[in-house]
Image: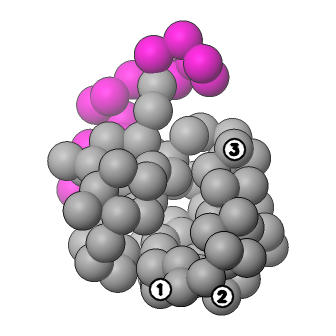
Amino acid sequence: MLAFAASRAARGPRKRGLFRMANKDDRLPDNAAGKWFVDSSCIDCDVCRTTAPNNFKANEDEGYSFVSKQPENPEETSQCEEAKASCPVEAIGDDGA
């Protein structure tokens, strides 16, 4: 947990829309393999888990959310897109692979 917090702090403050977007090189290790991911800037606000409950879960020990399952149909993809747009720290990405 300490290394995770240090990594988050080292990147400094984020300003929505100015320079921050999810970083596929900073994907959390719990993410399911595939296009969608959450990076270490996640603050575990619960927005993604509420918006796309079939695709996001919490790592309660470490205090972040992650992609538990890649979207498998248009409805899940739409929910993941909504979660990405709603994420307050822009920690959700869809350009992993």
Q: Residues within 10 Å of mark 2 (few under 14, many from 20)?
A: some
Labels 2 and 1 touching (C-beta < 8 A) = yes
Using residue 11 as the reference point, say whether residue 68 is left or right of it.
right
Say which amino acid is labelled 2.
Answer: Asn
User: Which mark, residue 85?
Assistant: 3
| The furthest residue to the front | 74
Q: Residue at x 32, y 28 (%)?
A: 11
Q: Residue at x 65, y 88 (%)?
A: 54
User: Which mark, residue 54?
Assistant: 2
Residue 18 colored in magenta in the image: yes
The answer to whether residue 30 is above or below residue 51 is below
Labels 3 and 2 touching (C-beta < 8 A) = no
Q: Residue at x 60, y 19 (%)?
A: 17
Q: Residues within 10 Å of mark 3 (few under 14, many from 20)?
A: some
Labels 3 and 1 touching (C-beta < 8 A) = no
**Magenta-highlighted residues:** 1-19
Say which amino acid is labelled 3.
Answer: Ala
Mark 3 secondary-structure assignment: helix
- Residue 43 screen position, x and y as percent: 58, 53
Report, in whole angstroms, how far the alpha carbon at label 2 lies from the one at label 1. 7 Å
Q: Which residue is mark 1?
A: 69
Whichever of labels 3 and 1 marks the residue nearer the N terminus, that label is 1
